[in-house]
Image: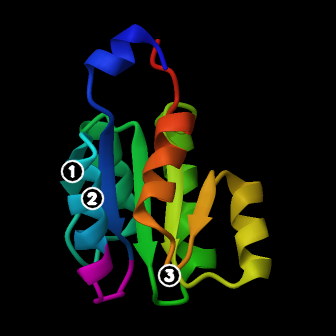
Amino acid sequence: MSAEQQERAVRCLVAKVGLDGHDRGAHVIARAFRDAGFEVVYSGLHRAPEDIVQAAVQEDVDVLGISILSGAHNTLIPKVIEGLKEYDAFDDTLVLVGGIIPDEDEADLKEQGVAEVFGPGTPMEETIEFIRNNVPERA
């Protein structure tokens, strides 16, 4: 991590995409990220992939954490990644997914550009440490 990054807090967008209405986990993650010193923006519920991309770009986030429990991850996450690429924001954004993702889907998501998938019960410190170790360098 560069000296400039240490001075500037890591900016995270915690996002709920699609029709998934369960946001308790997203709120827990957002609070843990804040407690770790990250700046956090929460998208709110029922966001379209385009809304998530717009928020990530406008907020100039370092990390996009997508919480998804609906089972629509194979449809919605690639749309978010495509949108980030269209705005030339993908290389500057660490994309994480949290939720119930089958192992075979996890490999596909990582192939498409998701940095890591965190399932239920992942220790919060593991997620925070992953971000600290993998947040993209800003030019």
Q: Residues within 10 Å of mark 2 (few under 14, many from 20)?
A: some
Residue at numbered disc 3: 120
Q: Nearer the viewer, residue 129 or 46?
A: 129
Look at the image and give the residue range highlighted in magenta.
18-25
Amino acid on which the number 3 mark rests in the picture? Pro
Marks 2 and 1, how far apart in space? 5 Å
The total of numbered circles placed on residues is 3
Amino acid on which the number 2 mark rests in the picture? Ala
Under tag 1, what secondary structure? helix
Q: Quadrant of residue 58?
A: top left
Amino acid on which the number 1 mark rests in the picture? Asp
Q: Residue 71's spot in the image, x, y percent?
A: 55, 89
Residue at numbered disc 1: 35
Position of residue 76 relative to residue 88, above or below, is below
**Residue 21 covered by magenta stretch:** yes
Position of residue 6 relative to residue 92, above or below, is above
What label sits on residue 79 in the rendered view? Answer: none
Q: Residue 108's spot in the image, x, y percent?
A: 77, 67
Task: Give the residue drawn at x 49%, y 20%.
Answer: 1
Q: Residue 103's spot in the image, x, y percent?
A: 75, 80
Marks 1 and 3, how far apart in space? 20 Å
Q: Please report contact status of discs 2 and 1: CB closer than 8 Å, yes or no.
A: yes
Marks 2 and 3, how far apart in space? 15 Å
Residue at numbered disc 2: 32
Task: Give the residue drawn at x 34%, y 58%.
Answer: 52
Task: Give the residue drawn at x 28%, y 89%.
Answer: 21
